[in-house]
Amino acid sequence: MHPSLAVHAGEWLRTEIVEPADITVSGLASHFGVSRQALSALLNGRASLSADMAIRFEKAFGVKADTLMRMQSAFDMAQARAHEGEIHVGQITGRDKLLPING
């Protein structure tokens, strides 16, 4: 997936769920039992969605936690793919001699 097509789960939750419900970040954080800072970071795309937070949104709004986690994973993968040229790792073949795990 092209990075421009991937949507951060938190940003989607903000625009499609939280803002239309006219709920404050502070109020929702209190309802969820999390800090306002943690929820704000998620909703503004500065932090990734955790499984626990996905379940909180599922319980509060009915949006499936699994769907939210797939959205976050797709976003994370698109971001990594956009920078994969910076990752310099060669393929391992059967002839490669690697160091043992304990050595």
Image: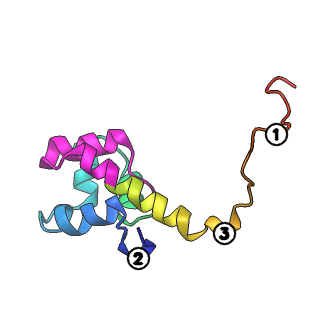
Q: Amino acid at mark 1?
A: Arg
Residue 47 image point, x, y percent: 45, 57
Earlier in the chain: of badge 1 and badge 2, it is 2
- Name the mark on residue 69: none
Q: Residue tagged by mark 3?
A: 85
**Could you say where residue 95 lies in the image, as x and y percent from the top left?**
82, 39
Which residue does the numbered mark 2 point to in the structure image?
A: 4
Taking 2 as reference, is 18 above or below it? above
Q: Quadrant of the N terminus?
A: bottom left
User: What type is the residue that disc 2 sits on?
Assistant: Ser
Quadrant in which residue 16 is drawn: bottom left
The residue carrying mark 1 is: 95
User: Is 81 or 11 nearer to us in this picture?
Assistant: 81
User: Residue at horizontal 34%, vertical 67%?
Assistant: 7
Secondary structure found at label 2: helix
Give left or right: position of 100 versus 59.
Answer: right
Tell me if mark 3 has few (under 14), some (14-19) or many (20+) residues whose alpha carbon lies within 10 angstroms of its own: few
At label 2, counting other C-alpha atoms closer than 10 Å, the crowd grade (few under 14, some 14-19, many 20 or more) is: few
Q: Earlier in the sequence, mark 3 or mark 2?
A: 2
Badge 1 marks a residue whose secondary structure is loop
Q: What kind of secondary structure does the magenta stretch mostly adopt?
A: helix
* Amino acid type at mark 3: Gly
Q: Is residue 70 above or below residue 22?
A: above
* Mark 1 neighbour class, 10 Å CA radius: few under 14, some 14 to 19, many 20 or more: few
Q: Give x and y (percent) for residue 56.
A: 25, 42
Query: Considering the image in quadrants, where does the C terminus appear?
Result: top right
Q: CA distance from mark 3 to mark 2?
A: 17 Å
The residue segment tinted magenta is 47-70
Q: Which of the 4 image quarters holds residue 6?
A: bottom left
